[in-house]
Amino acid sequence: MHLIIMGAPGSGKGTCANLLKSEFAIPHISTGDMFRKAISEGTELGKLAQSLIDKGNFVPDEVTNELVKQRLSEEDCKNGFLLDGYPRNIEQAKVFTEILKELNIKLDAVINLDIDESEIISRIVNRRMCSKCGAGYNIITQKPKVDGVCDECGGALYTRADDNEETVKIRLTVYNEQTKPLVEYYEAFDKLLNINSNQSIEKVVEDIVKAVEDKCSQ
């Protein structure tokens, strides 16, 4: 099963993906993880990406595209994958279509988490992260048992510097301009599954599983 999951910042992609990888028994692949792996292993692409990042530059599409191609060629992807954070724009999507052809992979579905912007802002500004294990909480919808303390490891919870309304609105503007056009792009290929993400994560995952299974059975 070969899937993409997309959605605005705060839509629940990461949380859903962590649950779906077990549900479908496929690896969750994020561009962030790919870059970190390539950099830690000292591959040529990893060295190039690191040099660009060190200079404060964005990693160009051609480097990201090649990294994705290499990652999807690895053994653990032979039975499928759940791709998160790629493609981010129409140009990447067009190249990705060619990558899939080259690797003889059929994309089964693109999961789009549809959510109100007011809900996104509420989720992100109320988000808290554990300083030790990285577990995530929300002081409105997913409170820790003890205020300011992680349920998992007892670490102190903190608010990320960019988890504020002003930064969220900037990120949403970038998403709407660059990534949201992918909704129409994949809709034209009859690959899109719109999922209501204005719900509990459990219900969102339940809806995704049903929609994907229905799509793959057609």
Image (cartoon, helix red, strand yellow):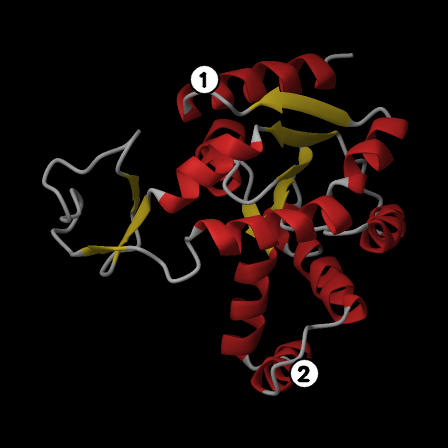
Q: Position of residue 109 (x, y in %)?
A: 73, 29
Q: Secondary structure at mark 2?
A: helix
Q: Residue at x 71, y 59 (%)?
A: 68
Q: Residue at x 42, y 44 (%)?
A: 124
Is the C terminus in the top left, top right, bottom left or bottom right quadrant? top right
The residue lying toward the viewer, choosing from 123 and 30, is 123
Q: Is 61 above or below relative to 152?
A: below
Is the N terminus in the top left, top right, bottom left or bottom right quadrant? top right
Q: Is 211 above or below relative to 126?
A: above
The residue lying toward the viewer, choosing from 138 and 50, is 138
Q: Position of residue 203 (x, y in %)?
A: 45, 17
Residue type at mark 2: give it.
Answer: Leu
Q: Residue at x 86, y 36 (%)?
A: 185
Query: Local crowd at mark 2 within 10 Å, few (<14), some, or many (≥20)?
Result: some
The residue lying toward the viewer, choosing from 71 and 207, is 207
Q: Position of residue 182 (x, y in %)?
A: 79, 40
Total marks drawn? 2
Asked if residue 33 lies left or right of residue 2, the reply is left
Q: Secondary structure at mark 1?
A: helix
Residue type at mark 1: give it.
Answer: Lys
Q: Earlier in the sequence, mark 1 or mark 2?
A: 2
Label 1 to label 2, Cα distance in Å? 41 Å
Label 2: which residue? 48
Which is in the foreground here, disc 1 or disc 2? 1
Instruction: Specify the quadrant of the image occupied by residue 80.
Output: top right
Query: Local crowd at mark 1 within 10 Å, few (<14), some, or many (≥20)?
Result: few
Q: Position of residue 46 (x, y in %)?
A: 62, 77
Residue 203's label in the rendered image is 1
